[in-house]
Image: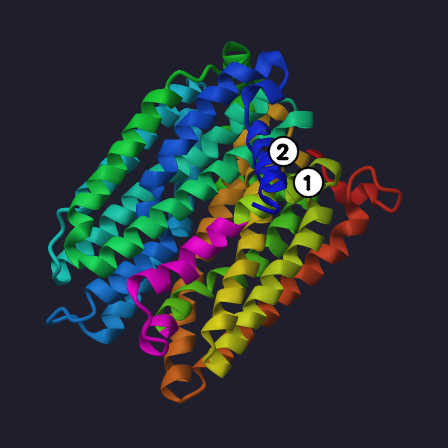
């Protein structure tokens, strides 16, 4: 029993941090509803996590007659890319949600996602079934992109900045834990019986429906005021969210445009890692469902709750540009470790790379949801988020297929491991870009006013 009491005390303290009583009274009701909804929704979402679904596609459809290896690898790239390609729809969701009540809108999008997850259970294991599965994953991710895009307005209006990063961190921790649980369930079940996805996915979808029922009770503070702000004046013009409007925003706010450029470079390197890693795990390491899902999903996501509190405290204190210049080192190191693991054919190093990726995902999840707040005025929040998400969708549509195009010939020539070194240098270039921007941070002594833009 030695050491048990301090551990239990620390665990109790950790759990108490999530209790609504840890927040000011006016925030507790909405926080409690969101917290319980995010205990259930991620179980559903875990079924279509990019890494998890890529492993399922690669292994479950690997021996299907009439399906070539190249076609299968393209399908792996497609389901890996789906979460990011779907981000191209963000400006559409921002436009559709403009002037409307946000929580009901988000609720309908959650329901569409749950329905798609349930339908995946009925696809046949055939070339046509793979096409239908890929389509359902993409549709589910498009709907979920709307949730992400619009949810940030709910958070901004319901939680003041002093509490926002910590609350977002708590939500991200809960989501990470439940995504990891879903990944473990799927991996273990698929190893026991590959056909288990036919009953497991509907069960996970039911958890999502239950989470949605709880989320519908969230109340958006200042809903009418926000609707008026979106419909009036400058917001009404800016909200006509077509691609030209997003380009206009880049011209209007040069600091945000420069930040988005370096995010695109940095993100390209990250998004290129996934599909070749899945192929390496299956073709070279010959991992089981569970081992593959551990590397691509469970370990990174399980690490996130441990790292998110530290990242949230940092993001609360500093501008997102400075945050990215520190946080970016995690992805640079992770790419280097994947290169080393593949070169040395070492599963321990591959597992270590997953741990480091988890550290990166932890900080990235916070900066993704909250970083644009350091640039956007309140009434243009969805517009800035839509731009961020759309640009991520563009690089997400390019990176996985570019990765396969580069990796396949390198692998056939016996140099597949060296592909990950390319990702390492692309990530490093993006990090250097963030570091170069630190002197432009609004409010810093070395900031250059002419370069800051109008919406800081």
Task: Confirm whether the magenta stretch covers residue 231.
Answer: no
Left or right side of 321 for 448:
right
Residue 316 position in % (x across, y down): 70, 35
Residue 355 position in % (x across, y down): 53, 59
Establish if 141 lies above or below 146. Answer: below
* Badge 2: residue crowd in 10 Å (few <14, some 14–19, many ≥20): many
Q: Quadrant of the N terminus?
A: top right
Residue highlighted by disc 2: 165
Give me the disc on residue 362: none
Residue at the image position 38 percent from the left and 45 percent from the top: 181
Residue at the image position 24 percent from the left and 66 percent from the top: 59
* Badge 1: residue crowd in 10 Å (few <14, some 14–19, many ≥20): many
Query: Which range is magenta?
Result: 280-303
Q: Taking the image as drawn, is residue 338 in sight? A: yes
Left or right side of 13 for 399:
left
Q: Taking the image as drawn, is residue 268 in sight? A: no
Decide: marks 2, 1 in contact (CB < 8 A)?
A: yes
Left or right side of 219 for 4:
right
Residue at the far bottom in the pictured view? 413
Q: Which colour assignment does the render follow? A: rainbow
Residue at the far right in the pictured view? 445
Residue at the image position 50 percent from the left and 82 percent from the top: 344
Residue highlighted by disc 1: 315
Residue 295 position in % (x across, y down): 43, 62
Q: Magenta: predominant secondary structure element?
A: helix
Establish if 450 lies above or below 22. Answer: below
Task: Confirm whether the magenta stretch covers residue 291.
Answer: yes
Kindly state the secondary structure of the residue where label 1 is placed.
Answer: helix
């Amino acid at each position: 029993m030695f050491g048990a009491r301090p551990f239990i005390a620390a665990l109790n303290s950790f759990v108490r941090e999530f209790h609504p009583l840890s927040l000011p009274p006016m925030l507790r009701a909405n926080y409690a509803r969101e917290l319980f909804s995010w205990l259930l929704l991620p179980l559903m979402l875990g079924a279509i996590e990019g890494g998890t679904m890529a492993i399922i596609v690669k292994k479950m459809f690997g021996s299907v007659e009439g399906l070539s290896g190249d076609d299968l690898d393209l399908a792996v790239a497609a389901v890996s890319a789906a979460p990011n390609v779907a981000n191209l729809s963000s400006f559409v969701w921002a436009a559709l949600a403009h002037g409307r009540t946000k929580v009901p809108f988000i609720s309908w999008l959650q329901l569409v996602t749950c329905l798609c997850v349930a339908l995946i259970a009925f696809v046949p294991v055939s070339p046509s079934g793979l096409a239908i599965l890929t389509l359902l994953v993409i549709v589910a991710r498009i709907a979920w992109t709307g949730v992400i895009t619009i949810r940030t307005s709910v958070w901004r209006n319901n939680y003041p900045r002093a509490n926002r990063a910590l609350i977002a961190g708590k939500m991200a921790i809960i989501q990470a834990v439940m995504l990891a649980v879903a990944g473990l369930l799927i991996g273990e079940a698929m190893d026991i019986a590959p056909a288990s996805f036919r009953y497991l996915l509907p069960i996970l979808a039911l958890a999502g429906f239950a989470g949605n029922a709880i989320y519908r009770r969230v109340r958006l503070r200042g809903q009418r005021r926000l609707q008026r702000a979106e419909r009036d004046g400058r917001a009404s013009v800016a909200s006509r969210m077509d691609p030209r409007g997003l380009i206009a925003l880049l011209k209007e706010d040069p600091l945000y445009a420069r930040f988005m450029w370096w995010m695109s470079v940095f993100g390209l390197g990250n998004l290129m890692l996934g599909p070749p890693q899945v192929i390496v795990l299956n073709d070279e390491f010959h991992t089981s469902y569970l081992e593959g899902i551990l590397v691509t999903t469970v370990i990174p996501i399980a690490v996130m709750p441990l790292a998110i509190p530290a990242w949230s405290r940092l993001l609360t204190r500093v501008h997102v540009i400075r945050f990215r210049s520190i946080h970016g080192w995690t992805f640079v190191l992770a790419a280097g470790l994947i290169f080393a693991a593949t070169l040395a054919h070492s599963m321990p190093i591959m597992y270590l790379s997953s741990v480091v990726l988890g550290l990166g995902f932890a900080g990235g999840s916070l900066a993704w949801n909250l970083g644009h707040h350091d640039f956007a005025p309140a009434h243009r929040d969805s517009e800035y988020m839509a731009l961020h998400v759309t640009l991520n969708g563009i690089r997400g549509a390019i990176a996985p297929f570019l990765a396969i195009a580069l990796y396949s010939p390198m692998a056939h020539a016996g140099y597949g491991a060296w592909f990950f070194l390319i990702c390492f240098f692309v990530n490093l270039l993006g990090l250097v870009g963030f570091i170069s921007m630190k002197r432009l941070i609004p409010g810093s002594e070395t900031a250059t006013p002419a370069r800051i833009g109008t919406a800081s």
